[in-house]
Image (cartoon, rainbow, N blue to C red):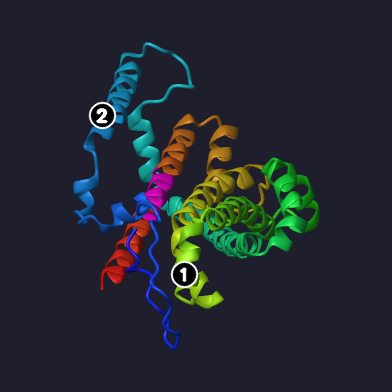
Amino acid sequence: MSLAPFKRPAGSKQSADVSCDCGNVPAAFQRAARPRRPLFARVDRRGAILPIVAIAIWWAVSEAHLIKSGLLVSPAQVLATAWQQIVSGALFKALSASLAREASGFVIGTLGGLLLGSVLGFSRLATRMIGPSFDTFKQISLFAWIPLISVWFGLGDAAKVVFLSLAALLPVAAHTCDGIHAVPRAYIEVARAFRYSRWQLIRAVILPAALPSIFTGIYLALIYSWLATLGAEYLLVAGSGIGNTLIDGSEQFRMDLVLFGVIVVGVTGWALNALARALERAIFARRSQVAAR
């Protein structure tokens, strides 16, 4: 790897010539350096084939009345329910409540995970003292904390946000710590040869090299917190939310409402995933432009 990214910090003394082969540039940075294409040019429309075929089979079976059961409703019934939920404002109320909880838990958990992961990544003492306990904590199923959380925080939004924060904290902390530990030793040696201070080493070498792993943790935290939102609304029933819409449909034996809720959950999850990927691409593209200057 070229030494161009390692600029000599201001005020440092001239050192001896240094040459070092630090390996290839990480693949994530190579991808970021490629010319960006329009968003819709990156969408593979072949992914719509399976949903279209599934809906067509569903429509044909329901219209032919091959299965006479209340468990099978037609796509037209689901569309009618969707329209009723949209017009009445019930969809907006439920989805906004779920997304507000998800956003709160995601932000709190991500910030806590970045802090904990950084401490574990940069401090050997913290790794020895906290690391074993954190590794044990990761093995406990997230839903095992529900009884304890419900006793301490009740069944309201506070308990749900705590639950979602735990769901987001674990992957962010683990990937942040792993990303820092995985920085190639050669990068650090080159930075030290250029007399980087500790802060310059962290800011200009370690964090950029660990950024792909950190983003993976944040991406997983976004997914886990959304999935945990539905679990929290199922198990901590108080309040509105898309999970409660599914519960209402199940209790009323309204499969059209249940299927509508499932579709909303899937589309929302897909949108969050697409948003996270677009943000990641934008940040890496910006970093590549700054590095090229």
| Mark closest to the chain's N terminus, 2 or 1 | 2
Position of 207 with respect to 177 (left or right) is left
> What is the three-letter code of the residue carrying label 2?
Ile
The Cα atoms of the two marked residues, 2 and 1, are separated by: 51 Å
Q: Is residue 206 visible?
A: no
What residue do we see at 34% from left, 61% from top? 284
Residue position marked by numbered label 2 in the rendering: 49
Q: Quadrant of residue 45?
A: top left
Position of 276 with respect to 231 (left or right) is left
Please state the horizontal and vertical placement of residue 290, each as a whole percent of the image: 30, 71
Q: Which residues are magenta?
A: 267-276
What residue do we see at 28% from left, 24% from top? 53
Q: Is residue 224 visible?
A: yes
Predominant SS along the magenta part? helix
What residue do we see at 68% from left, 47% from top? 236
> What is the three-letter code of the residue carrying label 1?
Ala
For the C terminus, the quadrant is bottom left
Please state the horizontal and vertical placement of residue 57, each as a whole percent of the image: 31, 20
Task: Choose mark 2 or mark 1, whichever is in front.
Answer: 1
Q: Quadrant of residue 22?
A: bottom left
Q: Helix, strand, or loop for circle 1?
A: helix
Q: Nearer the viewer, residue 151 or 84?
A: 151
Please state the horizontal and vertical placement of residue 1, each as a whole percent of the image: 34, 58
Residue position marked by numbered label 1 in the rendering: 191
Number of numbered callouts drawn: 2
Q: Nearer the viewer, residue 178 or 274?
A: 178
Please state the horizontal and vertical placement of residue 208, each as a whole percent of the image: 44, 64
